[in-house]
Amino acid sequence: MPRGNSSLDERSSEVGANMEGQTYFKFTNGGTDREEEVDTMAETDEELKAQSLGLKDLVGYQDGSVVSRTLIDKPTGTVTLFSFDAGQGLSEHTAPFDAMVNVVDGEAEVMISGEPHTVNEGEMIIMPANKPHALRAHKPFKMLLVLVRD
């Protein structure tokens, strides 16, 4: 898989940031939790810079999986493109700062503090800091996640 891409095929996963601002993914697989930090100092892929690109084309769908591609990864924040196959999602979690989800293909169900929100292609939603939130794909969708650290 090219640098900057990763596939998360576990049944339940979480993405967020810890209090030090490090980005992480958290997976639940068969009752065993594990946490994997992502290198927040990684450089942006050079092939993405200084050109017009279609977001939908930068990450593909994989059966039964969540696929991610980090577009920008700086100490002040990250921009990550995700694709979710039907039935996949990110488990409920909180983050110490606001996170913006922009749906670039399909439709997502975003839960914020127990309240469901349907977010369609071309729409966005801001998940407030320190409020529990989760995402679920009833059908395949792609989203751009923008995390800006305080």
Image: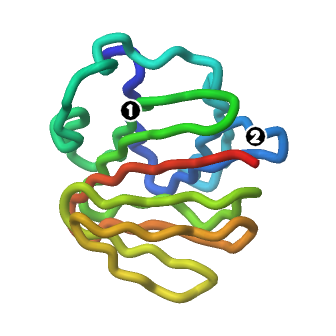
Q: Residues within 10 Å of mark 1 (few under 14, many from 20)?
A: many
How packed is label 2: few (under 14 Cα within 10 Å), some, or many (20 or more)? some
With 120 as the anchor, is 13 left or right in this view?
Answer: right
Residue type (three-letter) at the residue carrying disc 1: Arg
Q: Against 150, is 120 above or below?
A: below
Residue at 32%, 66% (x, y): give it.
Answer: 137
* Scheme of image coloration: rainbow
At label 2, the amino acid type is: Gly
In percent of width and height, residue 127 lies at 57, 68
SS category of the residue bearing label 1: strand
Give the mark nearer the N terminus: 1 vs 2: 2
**So how many labels did they put on this image?**
2
Considering every residue shown, the one lying at the far front of the view is 50
Residue 126 horizontal/vertical position (percent): 52, 68
Q: Disc 1 vs disc 2: Cβ atoms closer than 8 Å?
A: no
Callout 2: SS: loop
The residue positioned 70% from the left and 65% from the top of the image is 129
**In which quarter of the view is residue 106 placed?**
bottom left
Q: Nearer the viewer, residue 59 or 89?
A: 59
Residue at 57% from the left image edge and 78% from the top image edge:
112
Judged from this view, the residue extending furthest toward the top is 46
Disc ID at residue 69: 1
Residue at x 30%, y 19% (from the top left corner):
50
Q: Which percent across, then down, holds residue 123?
A: 30, 69
x then y, percent, for residue 79: 47, 39
- The span from disc 1 to disc 2 (Cα, nearest Å) is 19 Å
Q: Nearer the viewer, residue 88 or 133?
A: 133
- Check disc 2 and report the residue beneath it: 21
| Residue 138, picture quadrant | bottom left
Q: Quadrant of the N terminus?
A: top left
Which residue, as the protein is rendered here, is positioned at the far right?
Answer: 19
Image mark for residue 108: none
